[in-house]
Amino acid sequence: MKKLYLSTRDKKLAGVCGGIAEYFNMDSTIIRLLWVLCSFAFGCGILAYIVCALIVPRDTPVV
């Protein structure tokens, strides 16, 4: 079973979009563009990003 984690390898701010991209096996740029478009269209994207950054667990780096 796959789990959603904040990305430690592909992050710009907190790793939310990178983690979502890794979960769905997509390019993180597409996820970031969709997130920005939804933020402008619906207005709750910034709040959702902050909530995700606080709730979603961080991926443990591979050593």
Image (cartoon, helix red, strand yellow):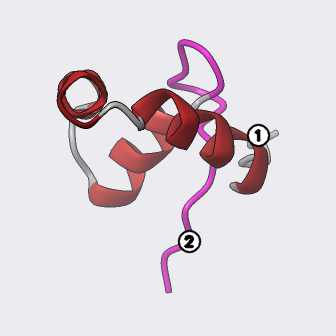
**Residue at disc 2, secondary structure:** loop
Residue 33's place in the image compared with 31, above or below, is above
Kind of residue at badge 1: Pro
Q: Is 49 part of what is drawn in magenta?
A: no
Q: Residue furthest bottom?
A: 1
Asked whether, in this view, residue 10 is left or right of residue 45, the answer is right
Residue under pointer 1: 61
Q: Quadrant of the C terminus?
A: top right
Residue 33's place in the image compared with 52, above or below, is above
Q: Residue at x 24, y 21 (%)?
A: 40
Query: Residue 18: x, y in percent?
Result: 45, 34
Density class for disc 1 (Cα within 10 Å; few <14, some 14-19, many ≥20) is: few
Q: Which residues are magenta?
A: 1-14
Mark sitting earlier along the chain (2/1): 2
What kind of secondary structure does the magenta stretch mostly adopt?
Answer: loop
Query: Residue 45: x, y in percent?
Result: 41, 34
Asked whether, in this view, residue 20 is left or right of residue 42, the answer is right
Viewer-side label of 2, 1: 2
- Hey, which quadrant is residue 28 in on the image? top left
Query: Residue 19: x, y in percent?
Result: 50, 44
**Residue at disc 1, secondary structure:** loop
In this rendered view, identify the residue nearer to me: 42 or 52. Answer: 42
Residue under pointer 2: 3
Query: Residue 53: x, y in percent?
Result: 68, 39
Density class for disc 2 (Cα within 10 Å; few <14, some 14-19, many ≥20) is: few
Residue 9 seen in render: yes
Kind of residue at badge 2: Lys
Q: Residue at x 52, y 43 (%)?
A: 48
